[in-house]
Amino acid sequence: MGKCHQKNYSRYKIFFFWIFLFFFILCSIECLMRIGGFTFLSIQEMRNRKSIAQGGDLRILCVGESTTALGEEKSYPAQLETILNDYREGGEYKVVGTHRVLFKRVSVINKGIPGITTTQVIDRLEDQLNRYEPHIVVAMMGVNDREELRKYPTGFLKKTGRAIRSLRIYKLTELLLDFSSKIAKRIGGHFFSQVTAENINESDPPGPFINIEQMRHWEKEAELLVEKGEYEKAEDQLNLILKHEPGHIRAHTLLAWVLHIQGSGMTAVDEIDKALKGDPDISEYTDTYVKAAHMYAYWAKTLNSEWLKDEAEQVFSKTEAILTQLLSRYPDTHIVYQELANCYIFQHKYQQALAVYRHAVESGVENKNIWGGLGYVWYLLGDTAQSEKYYRKVKEWEDKYYNANTRANFLALYDMVASRGIHLVCVQYPLRDIGPLKRIFIDHTGITFVDNEKTFKEALIQMPYYYIFADTFAGDFGHCTGTGNHILAANVAQSILREYFHIDIPPFITSGNIEDR
């Protein structure tokens, strides 16, 4: 018995020794990483100060989707550049203390791409950082992410989660997993491109009956060019596809989208007409029909002036027909309700828009976009109490849930820019609460947050919604007009001047020029 007891005791000793050794190694790695991180950041800060003192252009990179990309000279990045350059005192910016920033001018680079997700933003970011070497990155993104909802932890789980996420080892593990995922993606993409290239080389010269793999390769190339914002090249690629297959539905739709983004309204509508000419199967081409309806409604609104009213009514009729057909087939899809409500809103048929949203709720389709849409329609109808009721529902939802993809990609964005000593500015969308965005970075510091809720609500008191927003694509807000983008740019400029240059300034005049809408 004594020998057996002694043997078991020895086993326990060995077991606890290995447990102790494991945790000792983990703690040692954690300490070394914290010391290394502190040293790295200190050296980086010295280098940044030296770079700033040398002057030149202050480069600001704006990333996001259509809310960033659209508007050309009236987009918010373009107006941000104008505001910051107009504010300079004697050709330079000043920083509190002994440092003087001798930036000759501010250059704002707009890398927003319509329809892009946060994952696609992150995939492109490293190349953009290498190419432009910005001092500041401004990000407003997430509205296009598919919902992968998680409930915010509470109580003990919340405290434990924060403690674990603050560990350097946890962050290292996240980075390694992310790196391995990207490597796997690249290997898979390389393999796909190699196979496709072989098929193309072996195929017959272009003709009316083209190799199907080659056609798919061209489609993929065109989609990638659109995602990169290389619209002229995308047009050439899509026209190549249509030359060989004139009735190619997806090519017509994507070409219409490219033309729509570039502001060629009626040409985009013509392409959509060609895509739908053969009355394709709605179950196979649902995305085509939704895009078609969105573009029809947008350009009908643009046409809706006295001398183009007949054309506008025809396009609105097409839009309603498409969306009614979609709704009969997909009664639980919130985007269809949104687009149909927008179609009525553009025609000032607010009661019909209200009926659409009520139908959505009665059908059990309730999410923050539907509630935001209801809040907006009640606002248009002049019922402030009902409007606030639904906007509160949006806020309550955002306080409970977060999008797992959006959160992960914002944190990846932070890691990428922080490792290069670039200042990060995170912008919340107009009318939305800044709280959920700040909660993503609860364990991080050195970020400038731009709150657009109060300013836009105040602006809506002073002027109608359609002076500020061109549509209601997100439910509670839409794409900004020139005036809306001015308000947005002014808020971002004020935050940059305050947080980056430590200049306290009064709020900019944000009412904008009504003629710019």
Image (tube, rainbow, N blue to C red):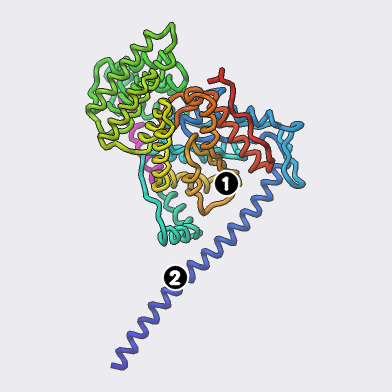
Occupied quadrant, residue 254: top left
Tell me the element at label 1. strand
Q: Which residue is mark 1?
A: 447
Q: Residue furthest top?
A: 307
Residue 394 shown left or right of residue 88 in the figure? left
Residue occupying the point 34% across, 32% down:
196
Which of the image's four quarters has the N terminus?
bottom left
Q: Which residue is mark 2?
A: 22
Category of crowding for the residue at label 2, using alpha-carbon neighbours closer than 10 angstroms: few (below 14), some (14–19), many (at least 20): few
Viewer-nearest residue: 277 or 303 = 303
Q: Position of residue 489 (x, y in %)?
A: 58, 31
Viewer-nearest residue: 175 or 332 = 332
Indicate whether residue 303 is drawn in magenta. Answer: no
Indicate whether residue 199 is drawn in magenta. Answer: yes
The amino acid type, in three-letter code, at marker 1 is Ile
Q: Which residues are magenta?
A: 184-203
Residue 136 shown left or right of residue 480 in the figure? right
Residue 361 shown left or right of residue 449 in the figure? left
